[in-house]
Amino acid sequence: MPPAFLKAEYDDRLARLRAAMQARGLDALVIGDPANINWLTGYDAWSFYTPQMMFVDLEDGPFWMGREMDAGAAKFTSYLSAAQIVAYPESLVQRADTHPSVFLADWIRQHGFATAHIGYESDVYYLSPRALSALQAGLPDATWHDADLLVNWVRLVKSDAEITMLQAAAKIAELAMQTAFDGARPGVRQCDLMADIVAAQIRGTEEFGGDMTAIHPLILAGEAAATAHPMWTDAVLEDGQTIAFELGGCRKRYNAGLARTLHLGSPPQKLQDTAKAVEEGMQAVMDSLYAGAICGDVHAAWQRVLDRYGLEKKSRIGYSIGVAYAPDWGEHTLSFRPHETVAVPENAVVHIILGMWMDGWGMELSETLHVRQHDCRRLADFPQHVHLVP
Amino acid sequence: MPPAFLKAEYDDRLARLRAAMQARGLDALVIGDPANINWLTGYDAWSFYTPQMMFVDLEDGPFWMGREMDAGAAKFTSYLSAAQIVAYPESLVQRADTHPSVFLADWIRQHGFATAHIGYESDVYYLSPRALSALQAGLPDATWHDADLLVNWVRLVKSDAEITMLQAAAKIAELAMQTAFDGARPGVRQCDLMADIVAAQIRGTEEFGGDMTAIHPLILAGEAAATAHPMWTDAVLEDGQTIAFELGGCRKRYNAGLARTLHLGSPPQKLQDTAKAVEEGMQAVMDSLYAGAICGDVHAAWQRVLDRYGLEKKSRIGYSIGVAYAPDWGEHTLSFRPHETVAVPENAVVHIILGMWMDGWGMELSETLHVRQHDCRRLADFPQHVHLVP
């Protein structure tokens, strides 16, 4: 299990992060998001369900901090030295009277950061209020700074190696969607179809295997298609259903999203009309997406198409995507919606997802797009039109 | 997508939770754990990657609070009325300048809780420091109480319907493990084997389909088996490898865990010795586990066996298990380890996992056990011995 990238790549990421930390006046940073930990060091294990963090200083680290039984994974999956792996004792797991943060705060204090300026991620899934407050209580003389998304903004711009990884993920996404299209027919249970789809995601290609996508694979069939994130059931697919799939592929935690729609039987006019608008909207988005484009302007290109068709979509149409663990593959930086003034940088990768959750039915079309100097490029090559199963 | 249980079952759960809230002097409770939300109402969607909570009062609720595009799922998957579904606008998602909690705090204040005693979950994955502090800032005259695990302790005791659900999950776990045993042989890529295993988990049986387990399915092969939670790779299985699987089954978010070990080729003596101790230890645990048993005493029964064999295991050997979303299927209540004085109640369900992560190799054996008045019962029926693939 060597790290996903060469050491020089991680060295470069660390240098870029430290520059961002210094620009914010930080001596150190506490990272709670396992995707950010993976991005910075390669560390990869399903270990973040007990407290785990990364402590980044300006000189000696970064330091992985986690449970003793997972310390071996830090050795196997990253270039971290033994001195950079800080394990708290198993006896601290899930206790009412103490917390791993108490131990970790002691370590940080004893290593010269008692009065440091320390940033922390305030809005991530795996650094809880209790974990943070115990950490802060153990370092009462430090100055704490909300540095949420600091790492995420640095990792917005992808390296060539990351683009290659995302291309592999997109290849897997194609295979998963083809499996969906091949298997969907009336009478098939949702769970049986999803079993084949997820198997295709994990099997990958002969050249490279796949991983679980960070977002749970989604099938939107029947009335559940009116909502965005339903779980599959063991109901059978039925003639007359419009079925949207939000799938994707994942390679070494790098996610590419892919959503498509099919219809069993004769397509209703409202589906055909909406699909036409959505395909045209996707083209308008792609035509307006290149390095330097403003997120709000990209959304406006979509909105103009929607307006012409008299359709409405309240939610944002996309976000940056990349390395991620459950439950989300979005990077929580770029959002394509009105009034967003951020410019999209070259070598960002974004997932544009046009989900139309209508009254009693729904459809989706998405692309994962590599933003280049003068244009953008689809990472997956898969027909956009609604697939009809007669 | 009807809720997993009858309305009377959810009514009973709510009554038990409200009694626990009143015993703690709480007027209301903010739940962040999606498993607790599911347990209380049936709500089921992959929607917790944006802020989502449940607000439980003593009279009118509970109230689901989440993103507008997911409100439909509350209608489809629970018995909640329209008045109990509180959606925040899409425009509040992932903003630097505001947070859904600001909107939700307004709602709570306007509904009579401005000066209430409000409990909250402090150490869950999906209620971040920022989400909590924005909520508290919007309700400055409320009195806030750390009520972490309050719901979890109430749901420790399972109903007959929940036991039936967990039996279904355990049946799926058997199928998954059989798939692992049937497919593991030298030359097979880990990802190809895991594709088949996960497909078996999702396909379930002809009577009922399966869901994704909350813990990522784990294969511990080769040197990675020395650590507890490695991710699969596309390396091929090799002759001479000891391979542990921590799998399980999931039905409607109810998880049953199942870990077993196999060896490719001729088994080394150290594996045979360790396996003998572990099987004997599992029997000792099962013999000491019944309603009223003390968690520390159950661990002591295991420790006596280990001591006799001169083996060591630093981590706890089990925990309660049940309804869960990624990344953990444990309920964070019972822990089987030294000095734990809690008595195991009748109709608890626990996952006893004897993971021996040794120097350069490892093995695991687990059982999901239904604790009854005078004994405990294995939910899955699968041979415990190390499976040998010649």
Image (tube, coloured by chain):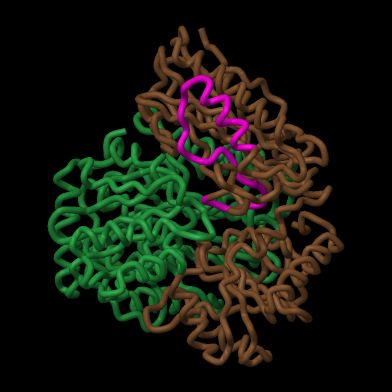
Chain colours: A brown, B green
- Given residues B104 and B339, the one toward you in this image is B104
Task: Give the image location of residue A275, x and y in percent.
Answer: 54, 19
Q: Quadrant of residue B183?
A: top right
Task: Give the image location of residue B175, x and y in percent.
Answer: 47, 39
Q: Which quarter of the rendered picture does the N terminus of chain A lie within? A: bottom right
Q: Is residue B217 above or below residue B314?
A: above
Q: Is A304 covered by the magenta stretch? A: yes
Tell me, yes or no, if residue B241 can be seen here: yes
Q: Is residue B331 above or below residue B38?
A: below
Taking the spot 70% from the left edge, 45% from the top edge, the residue there is A251
The part of the chain drawn in magenta is A298-327
Left-right relation of A154 to B195: right
Task: Give the image location of residue B237, x and y in percent.
Answer: 71, 47
Task: Give the image location of residue B179, x and y in percent.
Answer: 54, 39
Left-right relation of A264 to B65: right
Taking the spot 14% from the left edge, 58% from the top edge, the residue there is B15
- Given residues A147 and A91, the one toward you in this image is A147
